[in-house]
Image: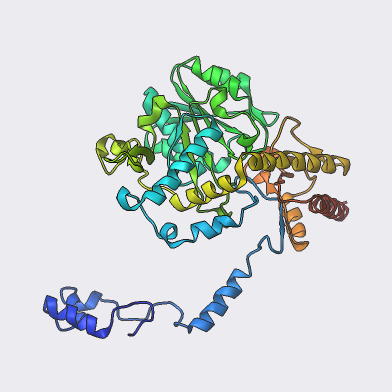
Amino acid sequence: MKHRYLPMTEQDQKEMLDVIGVSSVDELFADIPEKVRFKGEYNIKPAKSETALLKELSALAKKNASHDEYTSFLGAGVYDHYKPVIVDHVISRSEFYTAYTPYQPEISQGELQAIFEFQTMIAELTGMDLANSSMYDGGTALAEAGMLAAAHTRRKKILVSDTVNPISKDVVTTYAYGQSIEVVTVPAKDGVTDMEALESLIDDQTAAVLVQYPNFYGQVEDLGKVSELIHAVKGLSVVSSNPLSLAILTPPGKLGADITVGDAQPFGISEAFGGPHCGFFATTTKLMRKVPGRLVGETVDLEGRRGYVLTLQAREQHIRREKATSNICSNQALNALAASVAMTALGKKGMQEMAKQNILKTHYAKEAFEKAGFDVTFKGAHFNEIVVNTKVDVTELNKALFEKHIIGGFDLKRVNENLAKHSLICVTEQRSKEEIDELVAETSAVVAEMEAQHA
């Protein structure tokens, strides 16, 4: 066998060539003119032994900054949360790890039940009637929600709050472009959606308003008011939400949301340098048949035994493609399973305690920064994140903090010129009082040094 991980032997190759009636692999390409065939060497490094290759890959991996050595205060959509050890144990089982689409329910009951449990927990968290079996990530889930709203209302304009994660806004805009849907940004005021501006922008051609709760700056939006304004013109209220926050905040479904989406990454899913993660899509019974992606339903077999199946598949593109509501035809089943295991392990009280710690520790960080002489820009109710005026260039500040093995907050200048020298600091339940104090102390020292250099 020439290649260790390719099971085909030279004898296998000879037998296949004999069956199709050719004497060599080169003969398969006889119809391709000799002059256009590639005769050189590929520009790739020579193959290494397994031992040498492992050493090289390990050296490359060590260049990454991991939480084993660095303390992270970076959020902006992807967070460092507690992950019960049982999560990796369950999702590493081969029957889950290698499973793909459960088209054959008779041999996929475990996978289907796990997805059904995910749907149930997401629906309960969001206060919605039902949830699908997951989306690719939070950004694409929000875009799908906007497109559904436009199709449902037969309108061509959606409003997106400026406090929505900028990456998600870009995804929404990209989706909308292909369907000739106008995307209008609603300005922010004091870190939340400007309600007066929103009211002036809503008209009878508005399909939906898209807001985030808590929003990109960690502030808690007035969802009840948003829903009231958009429902007055028979549009839809679409909310992108951090699911962990919903363990303690009033769920969007109780505040008039028609669609609640988000990313389940806070529940047992590694940051993984930005993905893959697991989007969710929850909505009302009224919109059930327009939900993108898959739904798993509970039923009984001919003998009355409980079982699970993929249901309402007619809206997917592999059936009745001309009437498909979305181009998604798969889901993040393994990550949805990870989220389900994490939520189950934590339980209702555990999730509430986790969310409470996020609020308390973020509040502690806010007070610590203010005592150190920094201005925390937005004063409203917040979760997970705060905006701190660092007085200096955040990118340079973060470089200095990194040398102290601290991963600083997100540089808001990257997405908003008006917030230059402002850092989006994330504090989760993972951060200790000592780590928060160290961040504030080191930030103060670095800022003082940078200011002295420019004096």
Residue 215 in sight from this viewpoint: no
Left or right: where 441 falls relative to 324? right
**Can residue 178 be seen by looking at this rendering?**
yes
Point out residue 328 in the picture as x, y percentages from the top left corner: 37, 44
Front residue of this view, candidates 173 and 3: 3
Q: Is residue 388 above or below residue 84?
A: above
Farthest residue to the left: give it. Answer: 21
Q: Residue at x 39, y 47 (%)?
A: 112
The residue closer to the viewer here, 149 or 433, is: 433
Residue 238 picture location, percent across and down: 50, 29
Above or below residue 346? Residue 2 is: below
Left or right side of 160 for 12: left
- Where residue 114 appears, as percent x and y from the top left, is 45, 47
Residue projecting furthest to the front: 303
Nearest to the observer: residue 306 or residue 121: 306
Q: Please identify the quarter of the rendering in which residue 347 is found.
A: top right
How many numbered badges does the structure rendering display?
A: 0
Q: Quadrant of the N terminus?
A: bottom left
- Residue drawn 58% across and 72% down? 60
In the shown orientation, is residue 214 left or right of residue 294? right
Q: In which image quadrant can residue 271 be found?
A: bottom right
